[in-house]
Amino acid sequence: MADSFGFAEARKRMVEQQLVRRGIKDERVLQAMCEVPRHRFVPPNMWAMAYQDHPLPIGLGQTISQPYIVAYMTEQLELEPHDRVLEIGTGSGYQAAILSRLARRVYTIERLPELSERARLVLEELGYDNIEFRVGDGSQGWPEEAPFDAIIVTAAAPEPPPPLIKQLADGAHLVIPIGPTGYQDLMRITRHGPHLRTEYLTPVAFVPLIGLHGYAEPDENS
Ligand code: SAM
C-alpha cells in the first residue's frame, strides 16, 4: 500500500538531495536509508512529512532525528556486517532499523517504556528481527552484552558516560552528542587498546540523555 503514496520515490529524493549532496558516501548507508520506510516510524498524521529535511515529534516530548543526522552518525560508526552495535535512545526505532540493515545485531535501550514498545511493534511488523530491546537507563550501557563493535547515543550527555567507554571493543567507535540542551558537539571516541582518540565532528541539537551518567530528570513542577 505504501507506495501508492509515492513513499519509495520520496525516499530516493531524500537520499539524493539531503544525503548524497551533503557528502554521505557510504553505499551501504545510502542503501539502508533508501530501503527503510521512515514514515512508519512517525504518527500517521505526519506521514506526508516523514521524508522532509528536519526532525519530527514522536510524542512524549521526543523526536525522530533529521534524516541527514541519522545517515551521518551511522556513517561515522563504520559498521561491518558482522558487528554488534548498541544504541542508546530507541525513540521511534528508525535509527535502530537503519543499524539493523548494516550490522549483525542491534541492542537498543530506551528509558520510556511506551516508546520502546511502540518501536518494537513497528520493527517486528517490518520483519527486522535482529534487534534486542531494553527499557532502562542507557547511560549505564548493557554490560551483559558488552563489548560492542560500535555504540551510538541519540540523546545529549554532559560528558561521555564512563560505562559506555568501558563497553567499547578494541577499534570500536562511540558516537555521541556532548553538551547542554539546545546545542551540542557531536563527538566520536575510538578505543585503541588502553587509549582513546576523541574527534569533534559537527554541531547538533538533541534532546537530553536522562540518567545516572546523563542529566537529571526534569522537575515536572518547574
Ligand atoms: N534514535 C531515535 C529514533 O531513531 O527515533 C531518536 C531518539 S530521540 C532524539 C532520544 C531518545 O532518547 C528519546 O526517546 C529519549 O526518551 C531517550 N533517552 C533519553 N535518556 C535516555 C537514557 N538514559 N536511556 C535510554 N534512552 C534515553
Image (cartoon, rainbow, N blue to C red):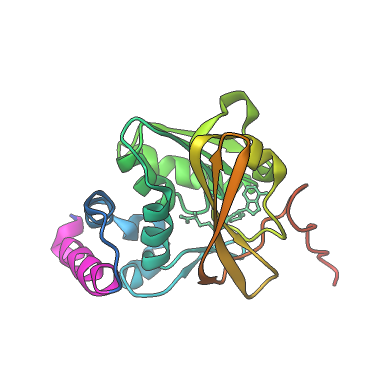
Specify the principal SS of the magenta part: helix
User: Does residue 5 sit above or below 106 in this rendering?
Assistant: below
The residue at 20%/69% (across/down) is 16
Q: Which image quadrant for residue 3?
A: bottom left
In the picture, the quarter occupied by the N terminus is: bottom left
Q: Position of residue 136 (x, y in %)?
A: 67, 40
In the picture, the quarter occupied by the C terminus is: bottom right
On screen, residue 197 versus residue 221, left or right, reads: left
User: Does residue 138 sit above or below 17 in this rendering?
Assistant: above
Q: Position of residue 101 (x, y in %)?
A: 30, 42
User: Does residue 6 sit above or below 193 in this rendering?
Assistant: below
Closest to the observer, 198 or 210: 198
Q: Position of residue 17 (x, y in %)?
A: 23, 74
The residue at 30%/69% (across/down) is 51
Q: Which image quadrant for residue 158?
A: bottom right
Residue closest to the far top: 144
The magenta segment is 2-21
The residue at 36%/59% (across/down) is 71
Closest to the observer, 55 or 143: 143
On screen, residue 129 versus residue 111, left or right, reads: left
**Where ligand 1 lies, by quadrant?**
bottom right
Closest to the observer, 28 or 130: 28
The residue at 32%/41% (across/down) is 102
Q: Position of residue 55 (x, y in %)?
A: 45, 70
- Is any part of residue 151 visible from this angle? no
Give yes or no for residue 185 being in the magenta stretch. Answer: no
